[in-house]
Amino acid sequence: MNVRKIVTVVEEILTEGGRAVAPAARVAVVAAVIENPWAGQGFVEDLSIGIDDNAAPLGELLAPRVVEALGAEPQAYGKAAIVGLNGEIEHGSGLIHTLKFGDHFRKAANATTLLPAVEKRGPAGIVFDIPLKHITDATIRSHHQTLEVRIADAPHPDEIVIALAAAAQGRPQQRLAPLTTEQ
C-alpha cells in the first residue's frame, strides 16, 4: 500500500439554530490518499489480490486515528472511497466494502451496525459527503447526519481517497421523534 498523505479534520459545532451546543458537537474524519492498487492494469476481472493486500492495512491505519481525533467515544460513523479519474468506482468499493476493512472501525468504535458509505469517482478537490449513522442502531434518527469533505489535491487520477468519519453525538439540536412513534 502506497500512502501519499493522511488528512485529519476535526469540527466542533458550538451553536446551531441560534442556540449554544453544550458540550460542543464533535465530528472527525481521517482520510488516506493512496495509490490505486489497480492503476495502469486496464480492466481487472478479479480484484481480490488488491483487496487482500490493502483493505485490512487501511482499516488498521485509519480506525484508531479517527477515534483518537474525535477525542470521545464514537456514537455515529461512516466511510468513503473516492476514486481518481483513471480508476473505477469498483476499486474504491472493493477496498471499503469488506469486513477486512470495516471491522477495524467497528472494533475501535464498539459498533455493530453496517458502516454507511459513499463511493464516487472524481478529480482532485472533489467535494464528497460521508453519511453517518448510529454505531449500534441505524434506525436512531438523531444520529443520521452527513459530513462534507474536500481534499484540495486528491485524488490524483491514479489514486483513491479512503476515509473514515465519526461523531461523538447525534445532530446538534436534533428534535425528531423516534422512529417508533410512527409504527
Image: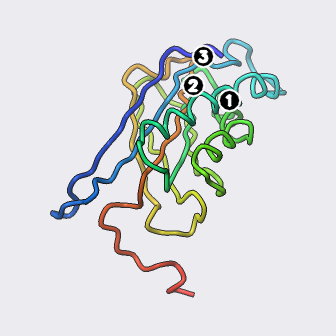
- Gap between marks 2 and 1 measured at Cα: 8 Å
Q: Nearer the viewer, mark 3 or mark 1?
A: 3
- Gap between marks 3 and 2 measured at Cα: 6 Å
In this view, the residue farthest toward the left is: 18
At horizontal 46% and vertical 25% (from top left) the residue drawn is: 123
At horizontal 35% and vertical 68% (from top left) the residue drawn is: 174
Name above or below for residue 126 compared with residue 153: below
Name above or below for residue 150 compared with residue 71: above
User: Earlier along the polypeptide chain: callout 3 or callout 2?
Assistant: 3
- In this figure, which residue is indicated by the disc labeled 3? 35
How many other residues sit within 10 Å of disc 2, few (<14), some (14-19) or many (≥20)? many
Count all numbered tags in the image, as a single digit: 3
Label placed on residue 9? none
Q: Quadrant of residue 46?
A: top right
Amino acid type at mark 1: His
Element at badge 1? helix
Task: Report whether 111 appears left or right of 8.
Answer: right
At horizontal 50% and vertical 32% (from top left) the residue drawn is: 65
- In this figure, which residue is indicated by the disc labeled 1? 91
- Gap between marks 3 and 1 measured at Cα: 11 Å
Q: Quadrant of residue 135?
A: bottom right
Check if mark 2's residue and mark 1's residue have beta carbons within 8 Å. Answer: yes
- In this figure, which residue is indicated by the disc labeled 2? 160
Name above or below for residue 23 compared with residue 6: below
Q: Quadrant of the N terminus?
A: top right
Q: Report the front residue among 176 and 109.
A: 109
Q: Quadrant of residue 87?
A: top right
At horizontal 34% and vertical 74% (from top left) the residue drawn is: 175
- What is the image's colouring? rainbow
Element at badge 3? strand
Element at badge 2? strand
Check if mark 3's residue and mark 2's residue have beta carbons within 8 Å. Answer: yes
